[in-house]
């Protein structure tokens, strides 16, 4: 355990010059570490309760060009040159912005956190859960993470999103249906556009069209047309039919691209482009009125914009191939147009009757219409096959997800997790706390999902809740090590002064034995005497020696 404390003299109170260990920057140290893991800068200079910008801190960080350097190492006692990992961030923008990992600077936070997620958690770009969702468990600084054992993102995530997060944390590998469900929605929307005229109606129209072509061709044959001229007419009919087929394919491709671009714009429009200060004030007012608003405004903005970018990228993944195909169709149509023009020019030089020209023009229009009808029917058939296939895949995945076998596998894995959780909850309070689950239905989609929660004999007090959280975090870290689940071997805690000194001593002892780094900011008068040790205290602050010196 590492402690960040104040050096305020005890029982030395002066009414004229009162001293306190509060407001010296102990918790801010934790926030700066979180900042190095991709947290937004506002978390450092915004009052967590009032949600107002603390201008003098913001100005100090920007005008003073304050640089935060965090060094990670596999050895918590000393920096190992072989494994050291250096993160640097400042609060400036544009050319003066520093956002670097091991000396490599990044232009934006998204690329920066993507690199962290690959290096520290071996995540792939676009993976769910996100890097910030996973590591927020390690930063129990503010509500909701400081108050909730499992639902440390508060109301920030919905049930199905928590399902994805916990399945990852617990090392339970199940098929991910989210991408399929999203694709299914896009394909259904496209099919609905195609079926503006029902397929049955199109089939009947095509049959009549073919009958009309047969009649016109019989009529043209009766005119005793020169065989060479007749062959060219047939070529012209075929070319017009192919041109119409390709033109319809092109129209469909452009429609598909337009739908995707429209969907991307709709998603991107959800980014917060309004006056954030005004909205923040409204949000603060809502927090005062509603006790269960657990997530901060800045967290909401950060998560929303991150999700918007991910969804936009996913929606647009097919655009490059669609555009390439459209370009190829345009080139082929141009070639057919040239061939049509050449045949038309040849036919115009031949001697023919007005009746033959009229029949030939009629046949040209009939073949063009046949191409349109045939193309639309084929597209509907292809899209129906695609939708049916996606539906089958989703149903198959859901059968696997909620099978008896999967249910038993999850129970077995949680039993392993709970062995560690039980050990530390027994160590803290002599009670068994554990993680269990149930199947619920999402009220928005009607889809089933696994809801994970903690069962505990009695965690009603705020202090005891803090002990439960620590027991879970220590137990989870050992569990993750055993099953090679990507994780961080440290936890940052605020509010541990709510616990009894006996439990603080126990956390110190347990974390030392488990080799888990626990960093706690705490007032001097709350520290048990045996923890008041320079070997454990890594930073002392006071009213005269604050973290930020102005």
Image (cartoon, rainbow, N blue to C red):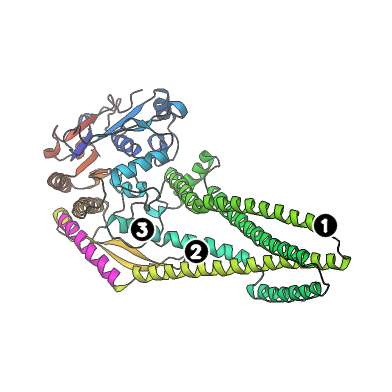
Q: Nearer the viewer, mark 1 or mark 2?
A: 1
Q: Secondary structure at mark 2?
A: helix
Q: Quadrant of the C terminus?
A: top left
Q: Residue at left 16%, top 55%? A: 429
Residue 222: percent from left, percent from top = 82, 75
Q: Quadrant of residue 365?
A: bottom right
Q: Quadrant of residue 526?
A: top left
Q: Is residue 514 left or right of residue 166?
A: left
Q: Nearer the viewer, mark 2 or mark 3?
A: 2
Residue 269: percent from left, percent from top = 56, 48
Q: Secondary structure at mark 3?
A: helix
Q: CA distance from mark 3 to mark 1?
A: 68 Å
Of residue 364 and residue 160, the one placed in the foreground of this image is: 364
Residue 141 visible somewhere in the drawing:
no
Q: Which mark is residue 348?
A: 1
Q: Which mark is residue 164?
A: 3
Q: Quadrant of the N terminus?
A: top left
Residue 354: percent from left, percent from top = 88, 65
Q: Secondary structure at mark 1?
A: helix
- Mark positioned earlier in the residue sequence (1 or 2): 2
Q: Which residue is mark 2?
A: 184
Q: CA distance from mark 2 to mark 3?
A: 19 Å
Looking at the image, residue 376 lies above or below residue 149: below
Q: Quadrant of residue 256?
A: bottom right
- Mark positioned earlier in the residue sequence (3 or 1): 3
Of residue 271 and residue 220, the one placed in the foreground of this image is: 220
Main secondary structure found in the magenta portion: helix
Tag 2 near tag 3, CB within 8 Å: no
Of residue 381 and residue 115, the one placed in the foreground of this image is: 381
Extent of the magenta region: 405-425
Q: Residue at left 16%, top 46%? A: 511
Residue 438: in magenta span: no
């Amino acid at each position: 355990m590492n402690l960040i404390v104040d050096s305020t003299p005890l029982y030395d109170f002066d009414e004229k010059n009162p001293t306190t260990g509060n407001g010296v920057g102990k918790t801010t140290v934790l926030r700066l570490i979180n900042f190095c893991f991709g947290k937004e800068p506002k978390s450092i200079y915004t009052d967590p309760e009032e949600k107002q910008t603390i201008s003098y801190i913001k100005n100090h960080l920007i005008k003073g060009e304050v640089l935060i350097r965090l060094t990670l190492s596999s050895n918590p006692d000393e920096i190992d040159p072989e494994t050291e990992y250096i993160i640097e961030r400042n609060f400036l923008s544009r050319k003066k912005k520093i956002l670097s990992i091991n000396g490599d600077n990044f232009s934006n936070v998204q690329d920066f956190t993507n690199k962290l997620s690959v290096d520290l958690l071996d995540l792939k770009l676009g993976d769910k859960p996100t890097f910030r969702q996973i590591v927020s468990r390690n930063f129990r600084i503010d509500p909701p993470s400081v108050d909730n054992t499992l639902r440390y993102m508060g109301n920030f995530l919905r049930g199905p999103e928590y399902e994805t997060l916990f399945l990852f944390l617990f090392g339970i590998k199940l098929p991910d249906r989210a991408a399929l469900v999203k694709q299914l929605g896009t394909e259904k929307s496209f099919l609905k556009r195609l079926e503006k005229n029902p397929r049955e109606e199109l089939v009947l129209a095509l049959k009549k069209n073919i009958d009309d072509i047969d009649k016109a061709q019989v009529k043209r044959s009766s005119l005793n047309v020169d065989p060479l001229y007749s062959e060219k007419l047939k070529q012209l009919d075929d070319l017009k039919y192919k041109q119409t087929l390709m033109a319809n394919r092109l129209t469909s491709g452009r429609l598909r691209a337009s739908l995707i671009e429209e969907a991307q714009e709709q998603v991107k429009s959800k980014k917060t482009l309004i006056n954030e200060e005004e909205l923040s004030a409204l949000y603060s007012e809502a927090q005062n009125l509603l006790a269960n608003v657990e997530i901060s405004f800045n967290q909401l903005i950060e998560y929303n914009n991150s999700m918007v970018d991910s969804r936009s990228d996913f929606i647009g993944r097919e655009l490059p191939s669609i555009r390439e195909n459209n370009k190829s169709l345009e080139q082929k149509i141009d070639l057919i147009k040239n061939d049509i023009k050449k045949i038309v020019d040849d036919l115009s030089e031949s001697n023919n009757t007005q009746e033959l020209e009229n029949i030939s023009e009629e046949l040209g229009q009939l073949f063009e219409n046949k191409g349109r009808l045939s193309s639309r029917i084929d597209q509907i058939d292809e899209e129906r096959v695609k939708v049916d296939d996606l539906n089958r895949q989703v149903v198959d995945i859901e059968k696997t997800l909620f099978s008896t076998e999967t249910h038993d596998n999850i129970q077995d894995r949680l039993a392993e997790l709970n062995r560690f959780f039980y050990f530390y909850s027994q160590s803290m309070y002599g009670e068994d706390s554990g993680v269990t689950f149930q199947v619920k239905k999402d009220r928005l989609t009607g889809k089933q999902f696994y809801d994970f929660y903690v069962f505990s004999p009695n965690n009603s007090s705020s202090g005891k809740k803090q002990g439960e959280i620590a027991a879970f975090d220590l137990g989870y870290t050992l569990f993750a090590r055993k099953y090679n689940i990507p994780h961080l071997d440290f936890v940052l805690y605020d509010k541990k002064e709510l616990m009894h000194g006996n439990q603080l001593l126990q956390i110190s002892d347990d974390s030392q034995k488990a080799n888990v780094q626990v960093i706690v900011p705490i007032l001097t008068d709350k520290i048990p005497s045996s923890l008041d040790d320079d070997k454990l205290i890594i930073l002392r602050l006071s009213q005269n020696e604050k973290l930020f010196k102005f």
